[in-house]
Amino acid sequence: MKYNGYAYIYTIGCQMNVYDSEKLALILNSYGFKKTNDMDKADIVVCNTCSIRHKAEEKAFSFLGRFAKIKKKNPHLITVMAGCVAQQEGEKAFERIPHLDIVLGTQAFSRFGQHIDAIKSGVQRVVDTKDCQMIYEAMPDASCFDENKISGFVTIMQGCDNYCTYCVVPYVRGRERSRKPESIMEEISLLATSGVKEITLLGQNVNSYGQKEAQMSFPELLARINKIDGIHRIRFATSHPKDLSINLIYAIRDLDKVCNHLHLPVQSGSNKILKKMNRGYTREEYIDRILTLKKECPNIALSTDIIVGFPSETDNDFNDTMNLLREIEFDSIFAFAYSDRSSAPAAKFSDQIDEKEKRERLNNLLQLQEQYTEKKNKELIGETFKVLVEGKSIKKRGGFEQTHKNMEQMTGRTESNKIVHFPSEHVNIGDIIKIKIKNAYRHSLWGHPVGV
Ligand code: SAH
Ligand code: SF4
Ligand code: F3S
């Protein structure tokens, strides 16, 4: 049935959730609900949730909890918990949020429409945490989405089979499965036609794309996407160190549209902890792969994820991680304090680390990394890079405004994923222009357009 009304979608979590929310918006649109940024106007409110850490989960409950009062005033409002927390909680979600209408698990999106119909026809509560083997093949296309979008996500895989002992993903996203290459190519071509210049391919472990299905490998998929007209940049996340093949390294080196940036989560620098995490590689193997990568792609920018305070992590183990940062000199890191997830095996491990200790380690690690992030950025001063223009700079930098008083400040990214601010001279969002780097800070670069 087609309705008239507005949908408000609140997204928590990773890039895959951002992509999923776009799909939810398209489904809602096909049911007659237009997207709104004004919550008060909404006839349906969807929270697309994340359960990776306790804090993310709490954010979802507190957001949805707020609607108890609002629903008293407007009983026709439909509230939906979608995504990873929904999958994890199922029926239990109603214990904390009794006014919830729909609990939509991670594999239930294609059935969302029929659940809205059910609620509209008077059904009280719907829970759908059932499986679905298909990955977006049967979903509405992405062609008509945001017209001004220059960068888009495309999910190429679902689930994970790696079972890292701290992680909920295999339990909330199911077994690893790869989307059909034709379906991926079709979506990227549609995005290119609508003006998208850069795509980021998403999956929990994109390196193992197609392996289970014995279909096209990830480097082969990259080569195919590299040929799509209109797409200028290809990014992907996340890569698992144990599956970083030499063919993928060659693909990064040889395919002109594949960006010279790799996000390769290491999680810890201690072999003892890596083993307990079930990561499937040692510190030495990780370093070895990075060395091969740097040999083949000397200008590659590297980023990683780190967990501190995993059960039984001693000062020595933590120092191994600190030393790994010193040795590799990542361009940037994402670091997290270990968060106990009851569905993941590590919740039962002994020697859980005190919260205060975790915070201290996290702060020390982040402080150490700041030096390297700044150092890596400073090394780029004097060089010229192609920058994809993303929009106006939100934060104005006082000093530079003095020298370029009459000009707008724009922002964009290098291929290596560094943010660059620059004074604008008639550039448009989506342009790719050359910028000479004049100055570098911890989180951004400053430069001037060359030859404009
Ligand atoms: N599939 C990716 C990452 C998925 S989750 C990979 O394998 O690297 C994103 C990041 O969240 C992880 O890399 C990890 O650093 C962090 N993370 C996952 N579970 C966590 C937990 N229980 N506590 C703290 N951080 C966690
Ligand atoms: Fe989680 Fe590990 Fe899978 Fe990444 S590889 S999603 S950390 S289980
Ligand atoms: Fe969170 Fe689910 Fe992504 S748990 S990190 S939203 S896969």
Image (spheres, rainbow, N blue to C red):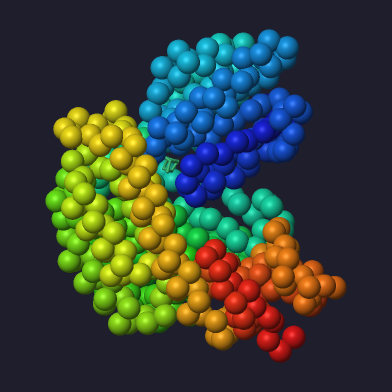
Name the residue located 31 percent from the left edge and 64 percent from the top edge.
Answer: 325
Q: Is residue 125 visible?
A: no
Of residues 272 and 169, which is closer to you in this image?
272
Residue 380: give x, y in percent of width and height. 51, 80
Q: Is residue 273 left or right of residue 146?
A: left
Q: Splitting the image into 4 quarters, where does residue 354 fall?
A: top left
Of residues 202 and 338, which is closer to you in this image?
338
Identify the image quadrant of the C terminus.
bottom right
Q: Is residue 376 left or right of residue 153?
A: left
Of residues 280 and 250, which is closer to you in this image?
280
Name the residue located 71 percent from the left edge and 58 percent from the top edge.
Answer: 394
Q: Is residue 58 left or right of residue 427?
A: left
Identify the image quadrant of the N terminus.
top right
Residue 31: give x, y in percent of width and height. 67, 33
Name the residue located 35 percent from the left edge and 45 percent from the top edge.
Answer: 360
Q: Splitting the image into 4 quarters, where does residue 45 fall?
A: top right
Q: Is residue 324 visible?
A: yes
Name the residue located 57 percent from the left edge and 27 percent from the top edge.
Answer: 63
Residue projecting furthest to the bottom = 451
